[in-house]
Image: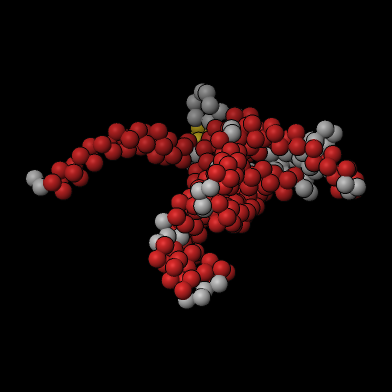
Amino acid sequence: MNVSARMRGFITIGLLPALIIYLFFVVVPLFWSAYYGFFDWKGIGAAKFIGMDNYIEVFTDPIFWKAFKNNMLIVAASVFGQVPIAMILALLLMRSTPFQRIIRASVFMPMVLSSVVVGIIWGYIYHPQIGILNFLLDGVGLDSWKKAWLSDPKVSMFALMVPIIWNYIGPYMIMFIAALQNISPEIEDAAQLDGVGPVRKLFAVTLPMIWDTVKVAIVLCISGSLKAFDLIYVMTGGGPAHSTELLASYMYNSTFNVYRFGFGSALSTAIIILSLLLIVGSQYLMKRDYR
C-alpha cells in the first residue's frame, strides 16, 4: 500500500466518528421528521396516519406563506445588508494596525453575544416608553416619527431587520478580510502600474479574486436567514397578528404550543425543501465566473 492510499485511509478513519454522529443526529432526524409529517400526532399517544393532509395544509396555509414572505425579507436584508457592509468594512480594516484591530473586535462583538441577549437589548432600544430610539427622536424634534416599533404590524418586520443585520456582520467581515489578504501583492502592484483607479480596481481585480468567498457568504446568509428563530422569538414571538412570523417560529408554535407534532414535522420538511431550492437557485444565478 502506497503512502497516498495509507493517508486516505487514515483520513477516512479520522472522519468516520464525526460522520456517524452527523448522520445520527442530523440526517436521520430529517427523514424521521418527514415520516411523521404523514401522521396526526400530538406528541403522546397513538399516531394516526393521514397521508399527505399535513403537507397539503402546509402549502395551502396563508400563515405559512406570510411567514415565508417574512423570511424572504430577512434573506434580502441579510444578503443586501450584511454582505455589502461587511465588504466595505473589510476593505477599510484589512490592515492590521492597533486601531483597526480594535474596530474589528468591536464589529465582531455582537456575534459573540447570545441571540437572546441581542434580542433583549434591542427590545429595550425599541421600547415605546423607555427605549433610546424614541428618546433620540424626541430629542431631535422628530416626535411624529416615534412609534411602538415592535407592536406596529406596518413597521415591526423592518424594525427586526436592523438587529439581524447588526448581529451577523462580524463573521462575514472576517471572511472577507482573510480573502483580501490572500490576494497576491503582485496583482495589486500590476494594477497600480497600469493606472487602475480604486473603483475599477475593486470591480475588475478585487471582487473577481474573492468571488468564491462572496458566494459562500451569500449561501450562509440564505441558510442562516431561513432558520432564524431565537432573536425574533425573544423580541416579538411572531406577533403582532403574525406580522413577524417566520417559518421556524411558526413551526415551533405549531409543534410545541398547539401540540400538532405531525403538522410541525411537515412544516420543518417544507422549510428544508425551500432552503435547498433557494440555495441551489442562488448558486445557479452565481455560477457564471465573475472574471
Q: Residue furthest bottom?
A: 194
Q: Is residue 190 visible?
A: yes
Q: Quadrant of the N terminus?
A: top left
Tell how many labels: 0
Please state the horizontal and vertical placement of residue 280, each as a whole percent of the image.
Answer: 46, 57
Q: Is residue 148 left or right of residue 82?
A: right
Residue at 47% over, 57% down: 180
Closer to the camera, 53 or 8?
8
Task: Out of 229 and 219, give the one closest to the viewer.
Answer: 219
Residue drawn at the location 58% of the way across and 45% of the way down = 99
> Which quadrant holds residue 190?
bottom left
Q: Position of 17 compared to 173: left or right?
A: left
Q: Residue 230, image x and y in percent?
A: 61, 35
Q: Is residue 271 visible?
A: no
Q: Residue at x 40, y 66 (%)?
A: 186
> Where 175 sits versus 192, above or below?
above
- Residue 263: image x %, image y %? 56, 38
Q: Is residue 269 above or below residue 191?
A: above
